[in-house]
Structure formats: structure tokens, C-alpha cells
Image: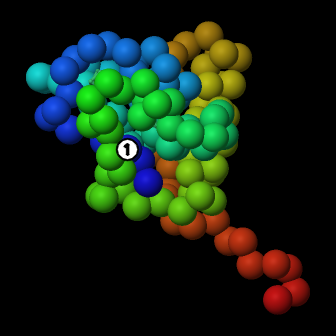
Amino acid sequence: MALMITSECINCDVCEPECPNQAISMGETFYVIDPARCTECVGHHGEPQCVQVCPVECIPLNPEHVETPQQLMAKYEHLMRAAAVTTLTGSPAAVPPMPFSPPDVTPSGA
Ligand code: SF4
Ligand code: SF4
């Protein structure tokens, strides 16, 4: 699942620079997480970095974005490819949407 920030957020600014996917930004009244960019830190760290640093524990799982570990890894790989394209082209291209259907993990021949 992607994570989400609740209205308990005190806008302390601590989590935003810790996110390896640039998924956290300031919203209208408090910080928000872009579910298209949050991988629960899968691919980068063993634990969600924002949760580790938040002083008020206001970053739960987002029930509207249920994802398997395989889907989170696929999202991470998608984000890395998009970052590589941005580096190669020199333009900060928006990350295109990706399908969030689970990858086929059925062993061949099964
Ligand atoms: S869990 Fe990781 S990827 Fe998701 S918002 Fe927090 S720091 Fe960013
Ligand atoms: S660390 Fe927690 S309280 Fe601070 S800005 Fe992030 S979500 Fe809000």
C-alpha cells in the first residue's frame, strides 16, 4: 500500500527530504503523499522512512491504495526507469501513469 498523511500532521518538514521517491509534498494545509510515487520505500529501504522520522505518528497505510509487495516493487522499477529517462533527456518529465495490476508471477510451465 501507499501511505498517507493525516490531519494530525504538524508540518514539521522532517519527512519530505527523507522520501527517496519524492512522493511527499506540501498540500493545502498539511503534507500529502502521492500514491503514484510511494512504494512504502520498497526498493530503497527496509522500512518506510517517513514513518521512522515522523514525531506525531500520523502516516498510516492508505486503505484506498492496497498493493502487494510485487506491485510496490513494480512501481519502484517504473519510477527508476522514469528517473533514468529524465536524466538522459535532461527534462524533468512527469512520471507517466502505470497499470497497477499485479505482475504475472506464475512459474513458466505451471
Ligand atoms: S513510505 Fe517511503 S516512499 Fe512512501 S512516502 Fe514514505 S518515505 Fe516516501
Ligand atoms: S514528519 Fe509527520 S508531522 Fe512532520 S511534516 Fe511529515 S507527516 Fe507531518
Dot 1 beta carbon under 8 Å from ligand 1: yes
**Residue 93 location, x and y as percent?**
50, 23
- Residue 61, relative to residue 26: is it above or below? below
User: Residue at coordinates 19% horizontally, 21% vertically from top-left?
Assistant: 10
Do we see residue 96 in this rendering?
no
58, 83: nearer the viewer: 58
- Image quadrant containing the N terminus: bottom left
In the picture of the structure, the residue carrying the numbered disc 1 is 3
User: Residue at coordinates 52% horizontally, 43% vertically from top-left?
Assistant: 39
101, 5: nearer the viewer: 5
99, 56: nearer the viewer: 56
Q: Residue furthest right?
A: 109
Classify 10 Å Cα crowding around label 1: few (below 14), some (14-19), many (20 and above): many
Q: Amino acid at mark 1?
A: Leu
**Residue 62 location, x and y as percent?**
32, 51
State the colouring used for the structure image: rainbow
Left or right of residue 48, residue 36 in this image: left
Q: In the picture, residue 110 is in which quadrant? A: bottom right
User: Residue at coordinates 59% horizontally, 58% vertically from top-left?
Assistant: 69
Q: In the picture, residue 58 is in which quadrant? A: top left
User: Residue at coordinates 42% horizontally, 42% vertically from top-left?
Assistant: 36
Do we see residue 17 in this rendering?
yes
Left or right of residue 7, residue 94 in this image: right
